[in-house]
Amino acid sequence: MSLNTPNAELFYIYDSHCPWSYASTVLVEKVLSAFPSITFRAMHVGYYDGDNKVSPTTITAVREFSQVTFGANYIDTLNYPKDSTLAANLMAWVQNKSAKSAFELLKKLQHAHFVLGNELIDSDSVGEIIDELKLSPPAKCLQSNKLTKDAEFAIHDIIEVQEIIGTQAIPAILLAYNENLVLLNHNLYLENPDAIIDAVTLELENLS
């Protein structure tokens, strides 16, 4: 089958501060590389609101079932609550204003957080990333005290999608083609990310 799939979309429901989302981003990258004409839709769920932590047990599990790495600085922050509000604001803005930069921004935010231990909670913590990608987000996107309207709208859209697929679990990777929507089981591919390419190829053939 041709890798030219202009009508296909890949929806990624995730949280920038979720370790399983961090691992699943590798799968998204594989799909986008193999199918460059697929439209990417980043959907940040804003799960981490400053009241919840990541457990060491979760990190152990992610390390066992995926190939991602966690930096020592990040591991040192596990005792502190996580807040992905700023990242949700920033990702909602970039998805609306510069969608072609959305995936690269997500990767850089996750690297800064999970490898470098950057909490991503103020403008200084994301300044270098924004400059590197030549983005110009408004100041309201660089705050962690509340969600922007764009981020709230994005979460409402996520709720609608979750109702369709029948699960609120994150992360979730969904393939849309010819008005059909398929939930890809990311757990099947974390240990062997390349395998998701064959899975997507098969789904596109079935949906064509």
Image: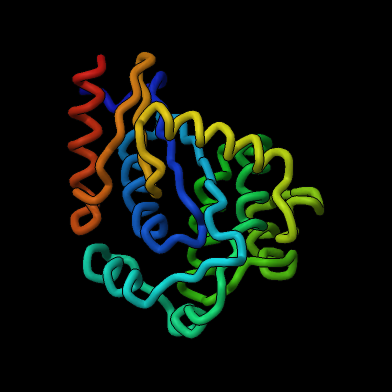
- Residue 38 point in image, percent of width and height: 40, 30
Looking at the image, residue 188 sits to the left or right of residue 95; the answer is left
- Residue 49 point in image, percent of width and height: 60, 60
Q: Which residue is drawn at the image coordinates 49% and 35% (left, top)?
A: 41
From the viewer's perspective, is residue 207 above or below residue 94?
above
- Residue 205 point in image, percent of width and height: 20, 21
- Residue 167 point in image, percent of width and height: 36, 39
Looking at the image, residue 17 sits to the left or right of residue 69; the answer is right
Which of the image's four quarters has the C terminus?
top left
Q: Which residue is drawn at the image coordinates 44% and 84% (left, top)?
A: 72
From the viewer's perspective, is residue 51 above or below residue 76?
above
Q: Which residue is drawn at the image coordinates 23% and 40% (left, top)?
A: 197
Looking at the image, residue 123 sits to the left or right of residue 42; the answer is right
Asked whether 191 or 155 is in front, the reply is 155
From the viewer's perspective, is residue 13 above or below residue 145?
above
Which of the image's four quarters has the N terminus?
top left
Q: What kind of colouring is applied to the model shown?
A: rainbow
Number of labels in the image equals: 0
Q: Which residue is drawn at the image coordinates 43% and 34% (left, top)?
A: 162
From the viewer's perspective, is residue 105 above or below residue 150?
below
* Quadrant in the rendering for residue 94: top right
